Image (cartoon, grey):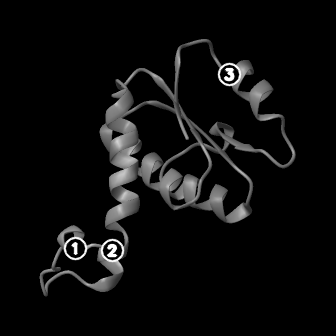
Amino acid sequence: MPEWNLIKLPESVSFEAAAMLEPMAVAVHSIRSVMPEYNDIAVVCGLGTIGLLITMFLVEMGVQNILVVGNKKLQKKMAVQLGIAESSYCDSVSTDMNRWIMEKPKAEAQMFF
């Protein structure tokens, strides 16, 4: 990595917190590229670190209709802890994600990948 591309961390920022800066920047960039409104339907496909951060930020923004797609029990648990209703979680291992999304109430969905 070129030296000019490095940023010195303030002593008040832990290495653990610093490690989250890049995934948080990706999540924020994703949301800013779409700019969902509170009454839009947002679909988050994939609940790894970035997908969970996107979900967390959408909840914090007050987006009312958030659908999430994951493939692990822990991902569902984390989504529910963030305030996502169980009925708004799709397990892509056992459910056809495309059909599940299309069966939800009709509205223009914002897709975050």
Three-letter code for the amino acid on which mark 3 is drawn: Lys
Give the residue at mark 3.
Answer: 104
For residue 103, above or below residue 31: above
Query: Residue 16: percent from the left, percent from the top?
Result: 35, 81
**Which residue is rendered at x = 31% and y = 76% of the image?**
17
Q: Quadrant of the C terminus?
A: top right
Crowdedness near tag 2: few (<14), some (14–19) or many (≥20) residues, C-alpha within 10 Å: few
Three-letter code for the amino acid on which mark 1 is drawn: Leu
Direction top: furthest residue: 106
Query: Residue 2: percent from the left, percent from the top?
Result: 27, 73
Give the residue at mark 1.
Answer: 6
**Which residue is rendered at x = 63% and y = 37% of the image?**
88
Q: Quadrant of the N terminus?
A: bottom left
Q: Secondary structure at mark 2?
A: loop
Query: Residue 34: percent from the left, percent from the top?
Result: 38, 28
Whichever of callouts 3 and 2 sits on the residue coming sooner in the sequence is 2
For residue 6, above or below residue 16: above
Give the camera-side residue of 49 and 85: 49
For residue 7, above or below residue 25: below
Direction bottom: furthest residue: 11
Which is in the foreground here, disc 2 or disc 1?
Answer: 2
Query: Disc 1 versus disc 3: distance between alpha carbons?
Result: 45 Å
Direction front: furthest residue: 2
Query: Residue 37: percent from the left, percent from the top?
Result: 34, 23
Q: Secondary structure at mark 3?
A: loop
Whichever of callouts 2 and 1 sits on the residue coming sooner in the sequence is 2
Q: Which mark is residue 1?
A: 2
